[in-house]
Image: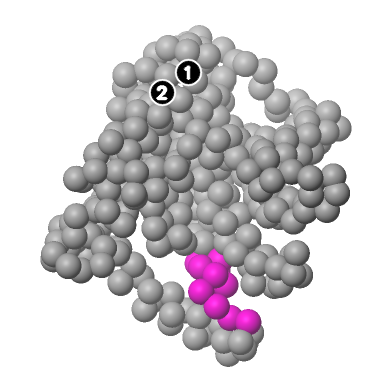
Amino acid sequence: MIAFIQPGFWVFVLAMAGIYGIFSLGLQVQYGVGGILNFGHVGTMALSSYTMAILVISYGVNFWIASLCGVAVAALGGAFLGLTTLRLSGDYFSIVSIAFSEIVRYVIFNSDGFTGGSQGSLNIPAKVEGDYPTYTNTWEPFIGWVKDRLAVIFGDNADRDMAMALIVWITLGILLIIVGRIERMPWARVLRATREDDDVPAALGKNVFQFRLQAVILGSVIGGIAGIYWALQFSLLSPDDFLTIVTFYGWMILILSGAPKVKGLPIAAIFFGFLYGGTRFFTFWPFSILDSSQRAYIRIMIIGLVLIFLMLKRPQGLFGKREEMVLE
């Protein structure tokens, strides 16, 4: 319970909220603009983080190049998903997208000699035998430099999580500006038209499939960036980091913010992060009669109840408009 009042814990929560915010922004591009119900978005995050880790640990590739390659692989994963299944109707695509993320996770889980399998990145074969397998050797000096700059202002309170939070939120801010500009382009207006009527872009001479594929790829790139930051925040990777429920955390943030608009997403991400972090300290009665694993499930239920309450009171989200809501 003492951690609840420690600033360091909430700085960590803020860093995680930023990562989830980037992750949700990818969903916002796909659903908020194109009406594409992607429930397997976490698969792109897994592809980018593991690609980066494998290239650095097993092949000695420069960290920055490996990170770009990770995001590129996430984009390819999104392209593969879109090319093979995007012609399906919304409900069927949603089901297949879940299968896509689970296939990615199970391939990672069962590829011990390549991805480290169930033991995660600790078991990825290292380029030099005997070396401790890590992919953060280049990142840590940079994050240390940022921490030293923050120490001038915050003193001893400046730590790795604070530096990470700053970098993540700067990235999220830049992405929000870019996506905001993209969503004012004719490309986005055509995609919004397809959410309710597939014949609209056809009447305009536009290729619906091509536009939606581009939205899936763009969202996957953003999800891939979130995957890189996820890997760097924890310094270790495991297949269990990329369960389907992670995608639904992203959906929670998206629903709270109001899917058609990006401006509410940062506030929704912070709200979710602090709600998710704060419920860790529900150790008082009646929660005290439950063990830690049971309380973990109760946390998810509480978050779900809060989400239901907010959706009953404000279904369009924090900054959305009722007239912009899309009923699939």
For the question of whether residue 221 can be seen, the reply is no
Locate residue 137, reporting x and y percent.
30, 72
The kind of residue on which mark 1 rests is: Ile
Quadrant position of the C terminus in the picture: top right
Q: Give the vertical position of 88 relative to 246 (above or below).
A: above
For the question of whether residue 96 can be seen, the reply is yes
Q: Quadrant of residue 8?
A: bottom right
In the image, which residues are magenta? Answer: 157-167
Q: Give the vertical position of 34 relative to 130 (above or below).
A: above
Relative placement, left or right, of 51 versus 203 is: left
Locate residue 289, reporting x and y percent.
79, 45
Toward the viewer: 260 or 183? 260
Residue 99's disc number: 2
Q: Helix, strand, or loop for circle 2? A: helix
For label 1, the residue is 95
Q: Quadrant of residue 44?
A: top left
Locate residue 46, reporting x and y percent.
38, 43
Q: Quadrant of residue 135?
A: bottom left
The kind of residue on which mark 2 rests is: Ala
